[in-house]
Image (cartoon, coloured by chain):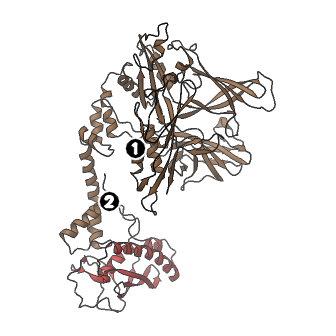
Chain colours: A brown, B red
Amino acid sequence: MSDTIADTQARFEAFITETFPEADVAPGSVLSELLIKLSAAVHNEISNDITDLSSSGSVADALASTTDTYNPVIDKIASNYNVTRNQGKQSTGKIRVYIARSRNLSLKAGVQFIQPTLNLIYDLAADMSISPTADTADGETQLFQLNNQYYFIAPVIADSVGSQYQVSDKTKFSVATDSSVGDFVMAEAYGNFTSGLPLETDKQLISRLKSGLSNKGLLSEQSILANLQTRDLSVQALTIVGAADSEMSRSKQNAFGISTLGMADVYVRTSIGPETIAVTKTATKVDTGSWQFVLDHNDVAGFYRILSVLPVGSSALGSQEITNQTFGYSITDFARANVINNTNEARFTQYQTCTVTFNYVESPLVDVGNQQDFTVVVYYQPNIAAIQNIFLDDTERIACADYLVKAVLPCFVSLNLKLFKQFSTDTLPVDKIKQDIFNYINTIPFGESLYISKIVDICHDYSIKRVDLPVTVDGEILCVDGTTLSISSTDVLDIPTNLTKGVTKNTTQFFIDYYTVGSDNTNLTDNIGIEVI
Amino acid sequence: MAISSITTDYSTRTKDILIFLGANPAKSDKQPVTAAFGNISAYCAGVQKLIQRYFISFFTTIGSQENFTDFGSNFLQRIISSRRNITKTEILHIFNFANAKVLGDFRTYQSNNPNLPLDEQIGRAELTDAIANGDTLSLTIKIITLAGDTITFVLPLPNTL
C-alpha cells in the first residue's frame, strides 16, 4: 500500500519529536513549514517508488504482491516473451438526452455526463449540432419529440479505462458539475454500453507470458486463446468442449450415438457484460396488427435475446410486443460451414436464425404483405462470426477438425445486500462497492462458482460493521433450447449440469448488469441492490 | 495586558524558530511585526509561538502548497482579488471566513493534542481594526488564548504582495 503525504508527514513528525523533543512541529510552525512538509513531499515519492520496486522488481515479487502493481520492470520482462501490457479500453455507448423545449443546440466533445449512483463519468465523444430540423446528411443530429418531451441521441465514451464503466440500457445520467447542456432535463443509456477493460496489472501480464512464446495454432485452449488475443477481438474467456466431454453432442449424431471425434465447440466471452446492438430490419405484415422478420448472421451472429423492436425513426420508448420467437439455423449462406444437426446446436452460433413475430398497428393501415423498416435492439456477444471465420479460414483452419464457435451461455445474476455502517456518521461509497461486485462477478473464470462470501469480503473492504446475512443471489441461465433456468443460493451459486439445455460449468458464465429493465420495458431495477443502515 | 509575564518558565516547552521579529512580549500595547530571516537566530515558545503559527497559517493561501492543499486560508487571495478601495466592512467579512478556517484547523490540532499548554492554545481571534491605504493594508488582530491572555498585533501588509 502506498504511503500518502500525510502518512510520510506523520512519520517525520514522530521521528523529530522522538529525537528532538523540544522541537515544535505543530501545523503552521516554522519547523513544520520549512522542514517537515518539504521533506515529506520528497521522501513520499522516494518511499513509494521503493515500495513499488520492492513489490514488483521481479516476477516472483509481483506475484507475491498483495496489491495491484504496474511496474515498468515487468513490461520489460514481458517484452522478452513478445507480450505487451494491455493498456485498457474505454467503454462506449449512446445516451438519450432529454431537453425541456424544441431548440437548436451545439455541444462540444468532452461535455461530461455522470451516473450519480455509480459516480462514473462519461464524455461526449464528438462535437454535436442538434436541431429539430436537422440535416442528418450534413452531420447534424435530429432532435426528436415524444409527447411534450424532446430528446436526441448522443455518443459518449468513458472518462477512463475500466470494466466498471459498462452500464446497461436505460441507466440514468445527469450533466456533470463542470458541464452544461441547455434546457437539460435528464438522460439515460440508449442500449448497453460496450465493455471497457482496465489497465492490465503485473499479475495479469505475467499470466500471459506463457502465451507469448506458445504455439498460436487453433488447436488447444491455450494456443487458441494466444491466437485470438493477438487480434482485436476482445476475447475475455474461452473454453473448449471436445471429444469425450459430456457436453459434446454434435459428434454423436449418428445411428450408433458414438462420438466420431474431430469436433469441438469453442465457447467464447467477448465482453465483460452483455452488450447491445441496434440493427435495422425490414418486417413484413403477416396479419392484421402482426408483423414478422428474420434475424440471422447478417444482422447479428449468435445473439442472446431481443431487447426491443420499434419502427425506424420512432420517438417512442419501450418496444412493440413480441408475440413469438422461433429459433432455427441456416448453413446455406456459407462457402464452408460447421456440422450442425439441430437448432439447439446452432443456438448462440453464427448459424442461428430467429423468426420474430410482433404486434404493430401502423398508420395509415396497409395490406398484408407490405413491408416496413424497424430498429431491433438485441443482447449479444460481439465478434462471434469473426472468430468463427478464423476457424474456417483456409490458411488457419485445422482441416481434419470441426471447431464451432458459440457465445458463452449467460447466467444473469442479481442480488440484494443490506450493509450496516461502522459509525452512523460514515458515508459509504456504495458506487465503489457496486463497481467491485460488478467486476468480481463478470470476471469469474469458466468452471468456478460464485461465492457469496467473496461478495461479503468485498463489502468488508469498506468501513462497514457487518453485512446482513443471509445474502441471496439469484441467477437466470439462458439455455440453448430457448428456455431459462433459474438458480439461487445463499452460499455458493453453482452452474448446474443440464446437458439437454446445454448448461454446464464449461459452457456457462456469470453476467451481471448494474440495472435491469423491468417487465414494463421502461423502469429500471437494481441488479446490485445495496441498502445502507 | 501583556503577552505574558516575562518570568514564565519556558524551559519545558517545545520551541519553534522565531521569524516574526519586532514583537516585544513584555509590551501590552499595539506593536507591528514583520516576518523576516537574517537576524540573530532565536527560538520562541508560549504565546509568541502560537501567534507566529496563526499568522503563518492565516497568510498561507489555501491550495498554494502542492501536497498540502487544505493548509492555510483564502484571506490573501480574496484581498488581492478585491477592488482597490476596499472598505473595512469588506475586509472584516473576508477576515471572518478565513479566520474561521484557521481556527477550525487549530482546534482540531488542539483536540488531538490535549497536553498543550493553555497559552499555546488559541481561544479565538478577532479583527479589531483594518486600515486600507492605497496599496497597503494594516490589520490589527486580537488573539485570546485558552489561558486568558489577550494579545493585539498590528500586521502591515506591503504593496509587494
Residue B122 picture location, percent across and down: 36, 80
Residue depicted at 37% across the width and 39% down the height: A200
Q: Is residue A497 left or right of residue B25?
A: right
Is residue A77 rendered to the left or right of residue A313?
Answer: left
Q: Chain of mark 2?
A: A
Q: Provide residue B117's location: percent of width, then percent of height.
A: 29, 81
Q: Which residue is mark 2?
A: A5
Residue A12 drawn above or below residue A216: below
Residue at the spot of label 1: A454
Does residue A129 appear to the left or right of A512 in the view shown? right
The location of residue A434, given as percent across then percent down, is 47, 47
**Disc 1 residue type (three-letter):** Lys
x and y percentages locating residue A192 in the rendered image: 56, 38
Q: Residue at x 67, y 37 (%)?
A: A136
Q: Residue furthest left?
A: A19
Q: Secondary structure at mark 2?
A: helix
- Give the Cα separation between the discs numbered 2 and 1: 32 Å
Q: Is residue B100 above or below residue A334?
A: below
Q: Badge 1: how crowded within 10 Å, few (<14), some, or many (20+)?
A: some
Q: Is residue A140 left or right of residue B160?
A: right
Q: Amino acid at mark 2?
A: Ile
Q: Is residue A430 in view?
A: yes
